Image: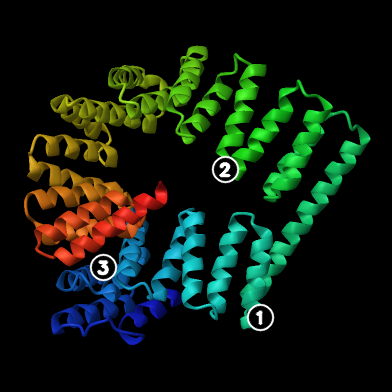
């Protein structure tokens, strides 16, 4: 409660937006803050929503709404709050409170990499805030990045020696590190007792992976290969290390070696397909997935991956056959997989230009899974292609309500709103897409089109220049 009161007060006391608030916006802001003080987060959400409607360009109003959503705590509110904080930061890149709350919220929903990135961006604005270092240290600790956590907690204590939470968390991390070191020493002794037992090396590799000590993990895995170059266990461990490191080329090479040693291992073939796909080697990815499915026709994860890769390769009929087979075998799937199979089938029909079949498939999906965002998205896509724009817009909005963090949904909605000349709404959706994914080239192109049609040529040119810069950087 103390945190929401403090942050709620900051909405009206600790700063203003870059332009003076209108009387109407200030009245709604005051009502929202009053509701926060009373613990009425529903009322706060309603009031801050009205403030945003009055001035969509006010970053502080967006921040207030995101904060109220965060503390209202309904299903989906965390995602809505994240989207709101991202938009507030997009409007005011120096609004540090938004970074702090966004970083903490990312951590609460398990998006630790995004949390780290957000806190690091906040530190570029203010590197003298001990509480900010405390939050960053907590995020490192949650990911078992203990050495980084130690350094960060130390910095918090340098800035504020009385930060007892940082001191307590530093002691906790120290104990965790000491426990890991004790486990490593115990495992080293077990290896000494029988240096020829490769399973004992495997356990040591796993310990090093837990500690994110990749060099030591690689060294031990290579020792395993030196002991027995024909034993796949060493390759399995090397593959695990490279997967943890995100080294797609080395991971793919290890799995290629594993399937040579064990050509009937469907799981290994599926892993090989995954890493070939990440290498953008579509042909070899398909070959690997096909082999995995041939070896184990009931391996649904491999069937999904194969269908997705067929779709990417524009082998639509093959993708459709697999998705239809998954739908037909729905009794063998988990509910989420059933929904994914219908959504994949609808996406394939859309790609084939068979829009009525896509609509029918989506309607079947949504009759059973009424909040499935991809069902709404594929339905909107089909309506869009049929120029049934009102129905498309409605279903894009449903998709966003179900998944507020998907930048593609906002971008496609923006483009459809542009088609029907609802430019202010289109502009808002394109800007939200960019706020969620600043590297999304297509969103900048959509934004440029909207601005051009609104007669804002200079801004349109700047948006297109940003799209070209992103494209060049990627190439």
Image coordinates for residue 436, horizontal then vertical, percent: 34, 57
Query: Is residue 420 at least partly visible in the picture?
Result: yes
Residue at the image position 17 percent from the left and 49 percent from the top:
415
- Inter-mark Cα distance, 2 to 3: 41 Å
Image coordinates for residue 251, horizontal then vertical, percent: 60, 34
Disc 2: which residue: 246
Image quarter for residue 353?
A: top left
Residue 402 drawn above or below residue 348? below
* Secondary structure state at the residue bearing disc 2: loop
Left or right: where 341 falls relative to 106: left
Residue at the image position 61 percent from the left and 15 percent from the top:
263
Disc 3: which residue: 45
Query: What colour scheme has been applied to the protein in the rendered image?
Result: rainbow
Left or right: where 422 falls relative to 43: left
Disc 1: which residue: 158
Residue 38 drawn above or below residue 67? below
* Secondary structure state at the residue bearing disc 3: helix
User: Closer to us: mark 1 or mark 2?
Assistant: 2
- Inter-mark Cα distance, 1 to 3: 38 Å
* Secondary structure state at the residue bearing disc 1: helix
Image quarter for residue 361?
A: top left
User: Closer to us: mark 2 or mark 3?
Assistant: 2
């Amino acid at each position: 409660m103390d945190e929401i009161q403090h942050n709620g007060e900051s909405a009206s006391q600790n700063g203003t937006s870059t332009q003076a608030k209108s009387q109407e916006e200030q009245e709604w802001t005051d009502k929202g803050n009053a509701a926060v003080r009373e613990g009425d987060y529903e009322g706060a959400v309603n009031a801050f929503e009205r403030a945003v409607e009055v001035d969509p360009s006010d970053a502080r109003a967006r921040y207030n709404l995101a904060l109220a959503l965060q503390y209202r705590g309904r299903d989906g509110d965390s995602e809505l709050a994240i989207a709101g904080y991202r938009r507030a930061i997009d409007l005011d890149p120096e609004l540090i409170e938004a970074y702090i709350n966004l970083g903490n919220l990312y951590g609460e929903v398990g998006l630790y990499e995004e949390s780290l990135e957000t806190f690091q961006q906040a530190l570029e604005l203010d590197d003298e805030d001990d509480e900010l270092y405390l939050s960053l240290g907590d995020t490192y600790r949650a990911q078992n990045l203990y050495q980084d956590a130690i350094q960060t907690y130390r910095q918090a204590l340098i800035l504020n020696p009385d930060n007892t939470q940082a001191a307590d968390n530093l002691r906790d991390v120290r104990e965790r590190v000491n426990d890991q070191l004790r486990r490593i020493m115990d495992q080293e002794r077990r290896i000494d007792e029988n240096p020829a037992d490769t399973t004992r090396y495997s356990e040591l590799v796993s310990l090093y992976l837990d500690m994110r000590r990749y060099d030591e993990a690689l060294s031990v895995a290579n020792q395993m290969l030196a002991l027995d170059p024909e034993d796949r266990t060493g390759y399995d461990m090397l593959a695990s290390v490279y997967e943890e490191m995100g080294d797609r080329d080395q991971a793919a090479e290890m799995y290629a070696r594993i399937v040579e040693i064990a050509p009937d291992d469907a799981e290994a073939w599926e892993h090989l397909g995954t890493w070939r796909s990440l290498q953008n080697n579509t042909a070899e990815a398909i070959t690997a997935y096909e082999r995995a499915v041939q070896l184990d026709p009931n391996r649904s994860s491999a069937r999904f991956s194969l269908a997705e890769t067929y779709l990417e390769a524009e082998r639509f009929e093959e993708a459709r056959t697999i998705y239809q087979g998954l739908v037909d075998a729905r009794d063998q799937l988990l509910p989420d997989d059933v929904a994914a199979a219908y959504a994949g089938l609808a996406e394939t029909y859309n790609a084939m230009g068979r829009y009525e079949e896509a609509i029918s498939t989506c309607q079947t999906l949504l009759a059973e899974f009424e909040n499935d965002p991809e069902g709404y998205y594929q339905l909107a896509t089909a309506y869009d292609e049929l120029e049934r724009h009102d129905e498309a817009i409605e279903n894009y909005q449903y998709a966003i309500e179900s998944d507020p963090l998907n930048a593609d949904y906002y971008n496609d909605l923006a483009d459809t709103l542009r088609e029907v000349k609802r430019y202010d709404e289109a502009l808002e959706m394109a800007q939200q897409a960019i706020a969620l994914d600043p590297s999304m080239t297509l969103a900048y192109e959509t934004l440029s089109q909207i601005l051009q049609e609104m007669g804002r040529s200079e801004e349109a040119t700047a948006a297109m220049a940003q799209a070209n810069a992103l494209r060049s950087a990627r190439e």
